[in-house]
Image: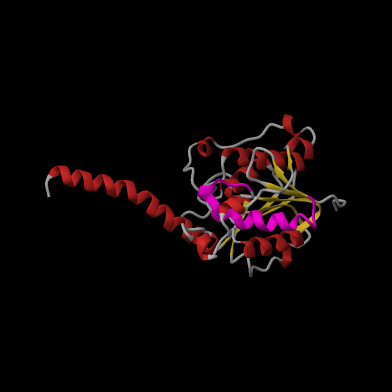
Amino acid sequence: MDSTNEGSWRARVKTLLPPLLLEVYRSARYGSAYRRPGAAENGNMPDVTEVQFTLPQRPLSEMFPGVEFVLVSTPVSELYRPRDMVVPLPELLTLAAICRYTKPKRIFEIGTYTGSSTLVMSLNAPHETEILTLDLAPGETIGSAFRNTTQSARIQQLYGNSLTFDYTPYNGTVDLVLVDANHSYECVKSDTEKALALLRPGGVIVWDDYRWLDIHSECSGVTLFLNEFQATRPLYSIAGTRFAIYLDHGTRQ
């Protein structure tokens, strides 16, 4: 093989490799929720062109009057991250603002991944807030954002499948629940049922990835379930973010 052909071959491999690795990564992270090319035609997932974002949009300031004047904190490290499958900065700042505004006593996150959202919630919640975050099993990536930081001591990392995890000790005691685990319809439905049981009267549930770009159509399970679930609860899409939100208007105990 001459050097010209070798250079061309290497260029082709370099072009193909990142998408292939990304395919493996997305499949591992989202399982059956990941929509591969041709999945819609095979009946595994809906065509992305058929998925509509029907939740009414509301600015954060309409749901939390005065929140636009709240000062929030985020580590500089969160400005420099891979763009794929991490919580974007607008969403991190939104979570930070919700924590500053509502001052939750207990937070429960379903789906840790790197823990960027966990870290930011910890930084912006009151010092006495208890923070629990759940993921499948220990791993190098899980909780890496808050591991070995000053916040790690106040974050309790839990392990287990969100479908079968025993939430009973925490039911009715959580002020803020973040749902961001497996994105299939069935898992989002189950995680939402668990989140409602966890919620204290007057609490808040936030779902990540209600809105998404076509390249992340594996998130359509979140959209499809919440579009249906809004018939039972007043749900909103937070303007300018991928988040959906539910505010319980019961009396906080």
Q: Residue furthest top?
A: 69
Estimate the x, y position of residue 146 in percent, counting from the top left: 55, 47
Q: Is residue 214 magenta?
A: yes
Which residue does the image show at 24% across and 47% down from the upper left? 10
Estimate the x, y position of residue 18 in percent, counting from the top left: 37, 49
Estimate the x, y position of residue 76 in percent, counting from the top left: 53, 35
Q: Which image quadrant for residue 192?
A: bottom right
Q: Is residue 225 magenta?
A: yes
Which residue does the image show at 56% across and 50% down from the upper left? 115
Image mark count: 0
Q: Residue furthest left?
A: 2
Which residue does the image show at 34% across and 51% down from the upper left? 17
Q: How is the image coloured?
A: secondary structure
> Magenta stretch: dominant SS?
helix
Note whether residue 139 is visible. Answer: no
Q: Is residue 230 above or below residue 168?
A: above
Estimate the x, y position of residue 59 in percent, counting from the top left: 73, 37
Note whether residue 178 is visible. Answer: yes
Q: Which image quadrant for residue 239?
A: top right
Q: Residue furthest right?
A: 251
Which residue does the image show at 79% across and 51% down from the upper left? 234
Q: Which image quadrant for residue 174?
A: bottom right
Does residue 75 appear to the left or right of 238 in the view shown? left
Q: Which residues are magenta?
A: 211-234
> Foreground: 193 or 49?
49
> Foreground: 175 or 19?
19
